[in-house]
Image (spheres, grey):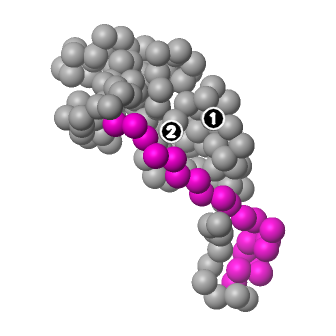
Amino acid sequence: AFSIAPRHAALRAAVVPRTTQLDMNVEAVDTKEIIKVGVIGMGRIGLVHLEAITKAPGVTPVIVSNPTVSKAEAAAKQYNIPRFTEDAMEVITDPEVDAVWICSPSQFHAEQIKACAANGKHVFCEKPIATDLPETVEAINACNEA
């Protein structure tokens, strides 16, 4: 089990209720099959991740998104990705997508993580998971319960 709490017991009691527990599960992945991914956010960090994804064996980006659709279009063209959109939910709900890379601004992370969990997607999220501890715990628990 994994617990989000300061190391010092007095701080832990003051900052985080003792019932706040997270269960971190890891599953083995069969690398023989191609994992199709969507990437949300085509800003600086999104492009860094997209560059790495395009070089990773067994992984193929199939869709990218950005609210400024011209950025999504440019990234799709640069990395030869078949589809792009301005709507992150199109990436999350796309039946072809196995996993979603979340590289959007931090304030959107928790809701996008929960949407990925609700849609049965594996998720990679650029830091932070959320902008506060309750949202972080909620997002992680949504993934654990999916």
Residue 125 shown left or right of residue 43 in the figure: right
Is label 1 in a helix, a strand or a loop? helix
Magenta stretch in the rendered image? 11-31
**Residue in the image at 69% along x and 84% along y:** 11
Magenta span dominant secondary structure:
loop
Q: CA distance from mark 1 to mark 2?
A: 8 Å
Q: Which mark is residue 117?
A: 1
Q: Is residue 110 visible?
A: yes
Q: Position of residue 114 (x, y in %)?
A: 65, 37
- Quadrant of the frame with the N terminus: bottom right
Q: Residue tagged by mark 2?
A: 123
Q: Position of residue 126 (x, y in %)?
A: 43, 47
Q: Residue 141 colored magenta?
A: no
- Quadrant of the frame with the C terminus: top right
Question: Which of disc 2 and disc 1 is earlier in sequence?
Answer: 1
Q: Position of residue 25 (x, y in %)?
A: 58, 53
Q: Is residue 111 visible?
A: no
Q: Which mark is residue 144?
A: none
Q: Residue 16 colored magenta?
A: yes
